[in-house]
Image: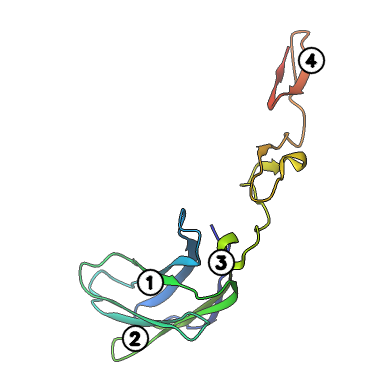
Amino acid sequence: MIAAGILLVSGAASAAPRLDEVSVQALTGKGGNDVVISVSIERPSLLDLECDAAIDTGDGGRIALSWSIGDSRTKTARYEYKRAGAYRVKVAGTGKAACAGQRETTINVGSPRAEGRASSPRCPAGWTLVDESVQGARYACRARPPAQPLRCAGGTSYFAEGGEIGCR
């Protein structure tokens, strides 16, 4: 998953639907620069029928999105970047049924195959990289120990070994 910050550029409270959230996620198993861009809107009421928006992908690409009655709050679009790199993705209301406001986020797109080199290994939250395990694109993660040891009772003491913690 590609982490992305979101910044509200403009858009005061309005009766029109407004852009609410933009997120970007890498497609797994592709080995390329494919991403899914998700855009969510906030509707003042369920009767708000239309909302049009455009995504500027940051590399010259443009994707149009539109919502109408019965559509879900979130629309997604698949996009393939030609090269790895950092891109500023911008979403803005367009056309006669424009969503209010604008959103933007900066994303980092890349893959080992696209650039001919391994990307930096990353472990999910709560896990830490096992340094000696890194061999090219291969690596391992282990559960991060708790910030504080467990408080053991009944004459037992805290232990942490082999990825397990407890009292014995």
Q: What element carries label 4?
A: loop
Q: In this figure, which residue is indicated by the disc labeled 3?
A: 114
Q: Is mark 2 on a helix, strand or loop?
A: loop
Q: Are marks 4 and 2 in contact (CB under 8 Å)?
A: no
**Residue 48 visible (yes or no):** yes
Residue 26 at what x, y percent from top left?
A: 49, 61
Name the residue located 38 percent from the left edge and 71 percent from the top edge: 41
Relative to 5, is 147 on the left or the right?
A: right
Q: Residue furthest front?
A: 116
Q: In this figure, which residue is indicated by the disc labeled 1?
A: 41
Q: In this figure, which residue is indicated by the disc labeled 2?
A: 98
Q: Are marks 2 and 1 in contact (CB under 8 Å)?
A: no
Q: Which amino acid does label 4 sit on?
A: Ser
Q: In this figure, which residue is indicated by the disc labeled 4?
A: 157
Name the residue located 76 percent from the left edge and 20 percent from the top edge: 159
Residue 90 at what x, y percent from top left?
A: 50, 81
Label 3 CA crowd tier, 10 Å (few <14, some 14–19, many 20+): some
Label 2 CA crowd tier, 10 Å (few <14, some 14–19, many 20+): many
Relative to 99, is 131 on the left or the right?
A: right
Numbered disc in front, either 3 or 1: 3
Q: What element carries label 3?
A: helix
Which numbered disc, 3 or 1, marks the residue that appears first in the sequence?
Answer: 1
Label 1 CA crowd tier, 10 Å (few <14, some 14–19, many 20+): many
Label 4 CA crowd tier, 10 Å (few <14, some 14–19, many 20+): few
Distance from disc 3 to disc 2, alpha carbons, whole Å, reads 36 Å
Relative to 3, is 12 on the left or the right?
A: left
Distance from disc 3 to disc 4, alpha carbons, whole Å, reads 50 Å
Distance from disc 2 to disc 1, alpha carbons, whole Å, reads 11 Å
Q: Which amino acid does label 3 sit on?
A: Ala
Q: Quadrant of the C terminus?
A: top right
Which numbered disc, 3 or 2, marks the residue that appears first in the sequence?
Answer: 2
Residue 144 at what x, y percent from top left?
A: 70, 37
